[in-house]
């Protein structure tokens, strides 16, 4: 494979070799089914429970409050649909934000098609939800609020602690999608006033296809996956033992030397942003200047189309994305960028670069140099740019 410069860590990450090493024995040596009763399987069961305990500790939760899932999408679906269904007798109104991941938005739309009402609160120009808007949206029949911890497209960190407090004061369930945050922000479920929280391993150098939903003791969203009695009887299916073990290992690594790692990623990202903004005209940085994940740089380049930018970056071995990976095959402008008030023209010229701790300054420099050249070439053949220049004369 040719060398790639990978700047799409919000889409997925490289599984850490130390994680792969930890997982390997669970495929072909310790392959017992954790539900089996003989000693051979007990090793698998103990490893799953050990993993549960270790991820629980990282978010200030109890071991019995962690439920393993097939990833972030399942955790989000479970929290939203299961939470809404569990409290449907009390009310059928849900509040979420307009900038959520599709796993949340589409789960809410499904509920709307089944007679639930959903309020999608907007954001400011930086993609940040205003807690007052959430407060004003709460009604007597509101049973669930879901607002993400940090946004996957523009990196904006949401005021979840305040929103959690509002929910708690009104006796409303609060879920947060922490898929972009776990491993990148400190998380404490009590301090944040959250009742349910979604995590996915492949966003923090763990394996794909595994995640968990934290569910506060005493809360029981309706079960979505019926079958065997795994996960305390609430989520059927033989445990993904290698995945679960790998996720716990990746989580442990993510929070080792956490401050150093995050600040060095932020430093490289800031350097990259500085160069792009000063060297490429008619460019804006999307997302919040302060409340922002350390790895995210999302830009809108005026007069050009992100699809063309991404193809040309790809030819140079550079991996980035337009909006979010889940949108990359659709022609619609990102719902996140539109909710932030970006005009279509800018939304279509948006490229997201997300850094990881393996990226180097040489890579950042190479990408800026190539990007400069690509944007210039595309603008030279852009009718919108030519028109703009004509008008200036
Ligand atoms: C990636 C992502 C998801 C989906 O997680 P999967 O494990 O890929 O299903 C959900 N929410 C956010 C914010 C994400 O970034």
Image (cartoon, rainbow, N blue to C red):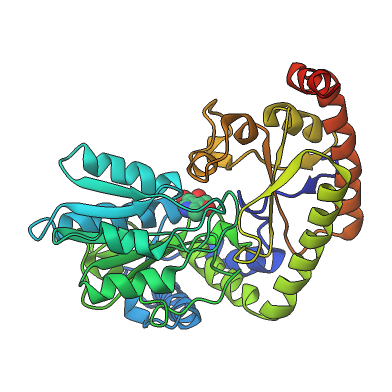
Label tally: 0
**Residue at 20% across, 67% down:** 220
- Front residue of 26/382: it is 382
Q: Is residue 333 left or right of residue 295?
A: left
**Residue at 15% across, 52% down:** 92
**Residue at 21% across, 36% down:** 113
Q: Is residue 206 left or right of residue 14?
A: left
Residue at the far left: name it: 89
Q: Position of residue 59 (x, y in %)?
A: 46, 78
Q: In which quarter of the image is the C terminus?
A: top right
Taking 204 as reference, is 117 above or below it?
Answer: above
- Front residue of 59/47: it is 59
Q: Where is residue 188 in the image (x, y as percent from the top left)?
A: 46, 80
| Residue 107 visible from this viewpoint | yes
Q: Where is residue 46 in the image (x, y as percent from the top left)?
A: 42, 79
| Residue 66 visible from this viewpoint | no
**Residue at 84% across, 60% down:** 271
């Amino acid at each position: 494979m040719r060398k790639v410069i990978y700047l799409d860590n919000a889409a997925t990450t490289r599984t850490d070799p130390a994680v792969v090493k930890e997982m390997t024995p669970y495929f072909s040596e310790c392959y017992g089914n954790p539900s089996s009763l003989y000693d051979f399987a007990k090793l698998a069961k103990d490893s799953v429970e050990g993993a549960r305990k270790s991820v629980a500790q990282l978010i200030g939760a109890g071991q019995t409050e962690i439920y393993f899932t097939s990833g972030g999408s399942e955790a989000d679906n479970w929290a939203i649909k299961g939470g809404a269904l569990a409290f449907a007798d009390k009310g059928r109104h849900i509040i979420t934000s307009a900038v959520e991941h599709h796993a949340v938005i589409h789960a809410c739309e499904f509920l709307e098609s089944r007679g639930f009402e959903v309020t999608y609160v907007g954001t400011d120009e930086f993609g940040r939800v205003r807690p007052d808007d959430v407060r004003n949206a709460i009604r007597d029949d509101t049973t669930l609020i879901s607002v993400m911890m940090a946004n996957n497209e523009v990196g904006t960190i949401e005021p979840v602690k305040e929103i959690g407090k509002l929910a708690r004061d009104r006796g409303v369930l609060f879920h947060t999608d922490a898929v972009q945050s776990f491993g990148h922000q400190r998380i404490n479920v009590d301090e944040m006033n959250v009742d349910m929280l979604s995590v996915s391993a492949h966003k923090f150098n763990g394996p794909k296809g595994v995640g968990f939903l934290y569910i506060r003791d005493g809360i029981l969203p309706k079960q979505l996956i019926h079958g065997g009695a795994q996960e305390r009887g609430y989520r059927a299916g033989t445990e993904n033992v290698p995945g679960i073990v790998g996720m716990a290992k990746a989580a442990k690594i993510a929070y080792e030397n956490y401050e150093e790692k995050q600040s060095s990623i932020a430093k490289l990202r800031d350097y990259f942003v500085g160069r792009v903004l000063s060297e490429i005209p008619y460019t804006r940085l999307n997302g919040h200047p302060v409340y922002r994940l350390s790895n995210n740089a999302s830009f809108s380049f005026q007069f050009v189309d992100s699809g063309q930018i991404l193809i040309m970056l790809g030819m140079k071995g550079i991996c980035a994305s337009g909006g979010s990976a889940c949108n990359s095959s659709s022609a619609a402008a990102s719902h996140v960028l539109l909710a932030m008030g970006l005009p279509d023209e800018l939304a279509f010229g948006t490229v997201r670069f997300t850094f990881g701790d393996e990226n180097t300054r040489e890579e950042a420099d190479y990408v800026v140099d190539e990007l400069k050249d690509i944007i210039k070439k595309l603008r030279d053949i852009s009718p919108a740019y030519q028109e703009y220049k004509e008008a200036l004369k």
